[in-house]
Amino acid sequence: MKKLSLVILVWIVFITNSSSQSQEKLLYVLGTSGAGIVYNTFQYLDLLHEGLVVECNSAEMVANAAAAQVGFLEVVEKSYLELKDSEDLSDPSDQLYIQRLAELITLLKEQAIHLNSISTNGDEESKDAYAKTKEAAWVRISDLLQLDSQKP
């Protein structure tokens, strides 16, 4: 326990004493990994859905995977919102980027919830909601990452 406390203390001292250049590096890593999370999550959910449609993936497997994504995305969403609301981000453009990532995470979480519903009961309402959420997520992802806005 003492070792863990020492490691945490060293980390806190390192972070609080880091130069603005180090802060910029940390923000860059946060931004690029956040971009990767939203892009890869979008692709993963779409692959799960397509596998369900062509019956390569079982409904149970898709339901479990979608539920796991919801849990993961809730943690990430909470972390981004806490960071955005903290005093750790002084630059308004950093705050805006984190806000946009948090909103995208929320949208992807909704997409995963709809995918779970499709896999458990397959109703048309869930299918329509999934398609609309997927489309909205792609528009935001392509805008945030400056990608071609055509569907992947």
Image: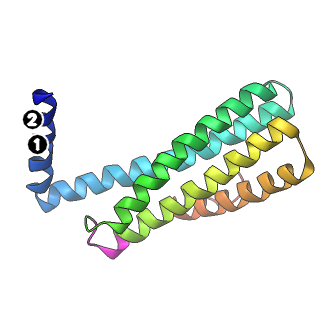
Determine the image quadrant of residue 22.
bottom left
Determine the image quadrant of residue 18.
bottom left
Q: Position of residue 116 (x, y in %)?
A: 74, 40
Residue in view at x 29 percent, y 73 percent: 91
Question: Is 146 above or below relative to 13?
Answer: below
Residue 150: say if magenta.
Answer: no
Label pair 1/2, CB-CB below 8 angstroms: yes
Nearer to the camera, 149 or 34: 34
Part of the protein shown in magenta: 89-93
Kindly identify which residue carries mark 1: 9
What number is the disc on residue 6?
2
Give the structural element (helix, strand or loop) at label 1.
Answer: helix
Tell whether 30 sits left or right of 73: left
Q: Disc 1 marks which amino acid?
A: Leu
Residue 90: say if magenta.
Answer: yes
Question: Is 116 above or below relative to 98?
Answer: above
From this viewpoint, is residue 152 visible?
no
